[in-house]
């Protein structure tokens, strides 16, 4: 209990008593406090604050009124502590913050091995692992910085107060995650940031929620490694494929935000074109010819040769490069019909015409008249 002091010569004090006094003098390592006693009380620099101080002048000045606790009393001197009074008053507040989970601001006063130190009336410690969600190599920028924290561990007997800024950040992220999950809908296209890569895909932050882009949803072509498509920290557009709010799992796609290979063929191919391709698959009814990545045309068995064949493999083999004529194009249905028979037939007709013109090269009407005259004779 705090006792207001009266200016009387026979005033008595005792150890552990809390009294009110005024700073009358400041020296290098101590301050002198007038507490109404026959001698001025000594306030050592170590008893000013729960934190280490190099200069008492940065905390106190002459004329300051403060409450102190009597630590030692003899005929020669009285030693008092401001730190212990502050701690007594602070513990109640700290306990209330701990029980309520209150978030409050503190100013970082010092950096020690293993974390940060703050003054909340008592010494508060923020372990390095509880400063941020990510690893921090150098804490020098935190000195004098104001950050939000909450009390995560308390032990008054050991004078132990553990604070966490990380818990505040995670709490904010969880609230944001919940809000994002409630708003997500299948089919949405959102901007996200690539957080980390794995062998099977990439996790993308889309507003507090990390959704998975499986490797099969990264591009329209086959992808060997996610790092071939994206890098950590990269901003990309993704499409929402699925949302499970119970498990907080979100499926995303990069591929679905980009024009597909068939869409890219618009204006590039039409019926009548002569195209080159590679035979990718031979089936009983024909062969599939790759004309562009992920775009295949069907060469039906009836369109392979001018003669009857029992199997496409009689004429074609997988991996073979061929030329074909486009018969029909239906890009919306992912269908292209091809023919090598028609192309072969056209080439044959061109050869026949070429031979005919070669044989009759230099032929004229006069020649025909001469032949007719000879026949009459």
Image: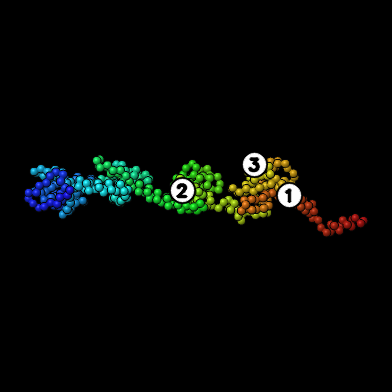
Task: Report helix, strand or loop for mark 2.
Answer: loop
Residue drawn at 42 percent across, 52 percent down: 179
* Residue in front for this viewpoint, 126 or 345: 126
Tell me the tag on residue 245.
2
Residue 73 percent location from the top left of the image: 12, 43
Query: Residue at 66% of width from left, 42% of height from top?
Result: 283
Image colouring: rainbow
Check the image and name the residue furthest to the right: 377
Instruction: Name the mark on residue 318.
Output: 3
Tag 3 or tag 1, which sits nearer the N-term?
A: 3
What percent of the width, then of the height, locates residue 246?
45, 46
Query: Which badge, 1 or 2, is on the more N-terminal residue?
Result: 2
Q: Measure the C-alpha gap from mark 2 to mark 3.
A: 47 Å
At label 3, counting other C-alpha atoms closer than 10 Å, the crowd grade (few under 14, some 14-19, many 20 or more) is some
Q: Which residue is mark 1?
A: 345
Nearer the observer, 342 or 130: 130
Q: Residue furthest left?
A: 9
Q: Position of residue 201 (x, y in %)?
A: 49, 44
């Amino acid at each position: 209990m705090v006792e207001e002091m009266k200016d009387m010569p026979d005033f008595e004090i005792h150890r552990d008593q809390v009294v009110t006094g005024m700073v009358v003098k400041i020296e290098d390592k101590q301050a002198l406090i007038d507490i109404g006693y026959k001698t001025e009380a000594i306030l050592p620099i170590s008893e000013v604050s729960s934190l280490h101080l190099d200069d008492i002048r940065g905390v106190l000045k002459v004329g300051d009124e403060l409450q102190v606790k009597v630590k030692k009393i003899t005929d020669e001197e009285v030693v008092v502590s401001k730190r212990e009074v502050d701690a007594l008053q602070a513990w109640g507040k700290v306990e209330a913050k701990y029980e309520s989970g209150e978030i409050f601001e503190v100013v970082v006063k010092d950096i020690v091995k293993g974390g940060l130190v703050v003054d909340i009336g008592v010494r508060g410690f923020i372990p390095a692992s509880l400063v941020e969600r990510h690893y921090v190599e150098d804490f020098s920028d935190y000195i004098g910085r104001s950050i939000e924290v909450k009390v995560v561990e308390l032990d008054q007997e050991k004078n132990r107060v553990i604070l966490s800024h990380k818990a505040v950040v995670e709490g904010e992220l969880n609230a944001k995650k919940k809000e994002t999950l409630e708003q997500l809908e299948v089919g949405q296209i959102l901007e996200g940031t690539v957080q980390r890569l794995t062998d099977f895909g990439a996790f993308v932050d889309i507003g507090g929620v990390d959704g998975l882009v499986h490797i099969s949803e990264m591009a329209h072509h086959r992808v060997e490694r996610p790092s071939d498509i994206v890098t950590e920290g990269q901003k990309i557009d993704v499409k929402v494929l699925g949302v499970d709010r119970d498990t907080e799992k979100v499926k995303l796609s990069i591929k679905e935000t980009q024009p597909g290979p068939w869409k890219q063929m618009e204006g590039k191919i039409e019926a009548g074109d002569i195209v080159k391709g590679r035979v990718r698959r031979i089936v009983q009814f024909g062969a599939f010819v790759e004309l562009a990545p992920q775009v295949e045309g069907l060469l039906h068995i009836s369109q392979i040769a001018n003669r009857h064949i029992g199997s496409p493999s009689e004429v074609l083999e997988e991996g073979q490069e061929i030329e074909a004529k486009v018969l029909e194009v239906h890009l919306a249905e992912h269908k292209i019909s091809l023919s090598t028979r028609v192309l072969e037939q056209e080439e044959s007709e061109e050869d026949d015409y070429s031979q005919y013109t070669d044989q009759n090269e230099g032929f004229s009407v006069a020649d025909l008249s001469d032949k007719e005259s000879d026949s009459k004779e």
